[in-house]
Structure formats: structure tokens, C-alpha cells
Amino acid sequence: MLDVETINTYYGLSHILFDVSLKVKSGQVVCLLGRNGAGKTTTLKSILGLTPPKMGRIRFKGEEIAGEQPFRLVRKGIGYVPDDRRIFADLTVGENLEIAAKKAAGREDWDEEKVYKLFPTLKGFASRRGGFLSGGEQKMLAIGRALMGNPEFLLLDEPTEGLAPALVRSLGETITRLKEAGLTVLLAEQNVKFTLKLSDYGYIIDNGRICYQGTVKELMEDDDVRKTCGI
Ligand SMILES: Nc1ncnc2c1ncn2[C@@H]1O[C@H](COP(=O)(O)OP(=O)(O)O)[C@@H](O)[C@H]1O
Ligand SMILES: [Mg+2]
């Protein structure tokens, strides 16, 4: 579904990503692990066109998308949950979901009720303003909002960051359910234990370079690699 081939991304003159390549097959959950500052967010932003790579190729469902505008990529079926959540603080939970709604061609749509079924906590807060939710609730809302756009492929940036352990567990169940519903996911995380339980395949990024890739089994067994890659 997604094929990232040797991308190089810069912030101004700072070279951040060095020949990053990764693949995500349809129906998989693939993780991108790495310590703080390793380049996870920049990789996701490069895919979505928020920080377009200077060199390299990105193909989504066979089509070249490097340098495309983010809104076009969202229309093509890519959903994005940023690490800073970026929900609308002044809109209610319900309004935050409604404005993100986008019909999917030929597929069953997400709607508010389905999001509330996935996150029952949010249902009680439907008319509460986003800014009054806790960090964990805002995360759920950010994921719910991305789902309202009916993506085929979801970029999830550090969803467990700052969440209490019980919420991390329920988030894990949520991602598993989304996968069962057919969603393909690229998950950027620092939380190795959480991530490996959910993923089919993993990449480790360090200093802007992919330093390891393998199946979850290989990643679990290889403590040395994890140590040298800093996670
Ligand atoms: N807007 C920016 N301008 C300049 N440098 C940035 C910017 N955002 C991130 N960086 C740098 O890019 C590197 C990778 O950051 P990032 O992709 O956010 O890492 P991660 O998500 O893995 O924590 C870091 O060295 C960070 O300091
Ligand atoms: Mg990040």
C-alpha cells in the first residue's frame, strides 16, 4: 500500500532524514520505533507532504505522491493523527467529529455513533468542548476524527505518549480492532512493549536513518539491535 524509497528530508538547511525506506502492506500494522528526536514524526510528515522530502520516492497504492499537498493525500485515503493531537479546543466533541466527516466510496462509513462505540468515554462528552477533555480523551478524539475521514491507511504518531497504563491497554485493543476492520496502519512509537504486541513488521530509526528492520519476532529476540538503535 505504501512504499517509501530512500527519502531525504530537511528542515531548512538541517538534513534530518537520510535515505529512509520502508514498506507497509495492505492490512498490516507496521511500526516505526525510535528514541526522541530520531526522526519518526519527520518521516510521517514527509509521507503526508507536510515536510516534503527533497529526494526519494513515495508511492501510495502504486501512485507517486512525494510532494503532493496534504489535503489531496487525505482525499486519497490517508488519515493522520499528529502527536500533538491538534483538536479544536473551542468546538464540542461532536463538532470536532462532524467537521472531519468525509464519505468513502463503496465502503462502510465511519460516523459519530461508530466512533462513540469505539470510545464509549467520548459519548458522554459529545457536547463538551474539546479543550476541556483530559489528554487521554483528546487522543481518543484525535483518532476518532481521523477515522471520520474514512482513511484506508492511518499514520499514527506516538499515540501512547502521556497516557495512563489503563488507557494504553485500551488503545492497543482499539488499534487491533481497527486492523480487524481492514485499516492499514503505520505506527510511530517509543513504547516498544506496546508496539511490538500490535505490529506485523517493524523498523527502527535512529539519527534519521533506518538502522534495523524485521518481523516482530526478530525484533523481540534481538536485544543488541534494540540497544544500538537506542530503544
Ligand atoms: N521544525 C523543525 N525545525 C528544525 N528541526 C526540527 C524540527 N522538527 C524537528 N526537528 C529536528 O529533527 C530531528 C527529528 O525530529 P522528529 O522527527 O520530531 O523526531 P521524533 O518524532 O522521532 O522524536 C530532531 O533532531 C529534531 O530536533
Ligand atoms: Mg515525534
Image (cartoon, grey):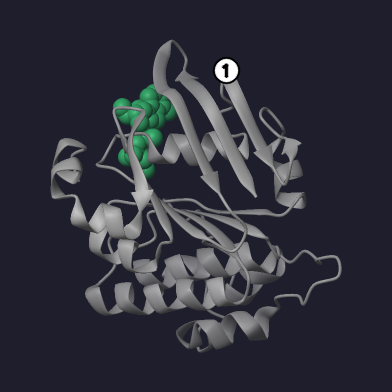
Q: Position of residue 29 (x, y in %)?
A: 48, 60
Q: What element carries label 1?
A: strand
Say which residue appears at 27% left-offset and 80% top-offset: 166
Residue placed most toward the observer, 114 or 1 = 1
Residue 32 visible (yes or no): no
Say which residue appears at 51% left-offset and 69% top-offset: 141
Q: Where is residue 59 in the image (x, y as percent from the top left)?
A: 67, 37
Q: 87 above or below 41?
A: below
Q: What residue type is labelled 1?
A: Met
Q: Mark 1 points at which residue?
A: 55
Say which residue appears at 56% left-offset and 24% top-offset: 53
Res. 115 image quadrant? bottom right
Q: 42 above or below 75?
A: above
Is 188 displayed left or right of 113 in the figure? left
Residue 214 visible (yes or no): yes
Say which residue appears at 16% left-offset and 36% top-offset: 228
Within 10 Å of the Cα at label 1, are there few (<14), some (14-19), or many (20+) other Cα atoms? some
Is 178 displayed left or right of 211 in the figure? right
Residue, far top: 13
Residue placed most toward the observer, 127 or 113 = 113
Q: 65 above or below 224?
A: above
Q: Position of residue 171 (x, y in %)?
A: 39, 73
Q: Position of residue 33 (x, y in %)?
A: 32, 47
Is 15 displayed left or right of 22 in the figure? left
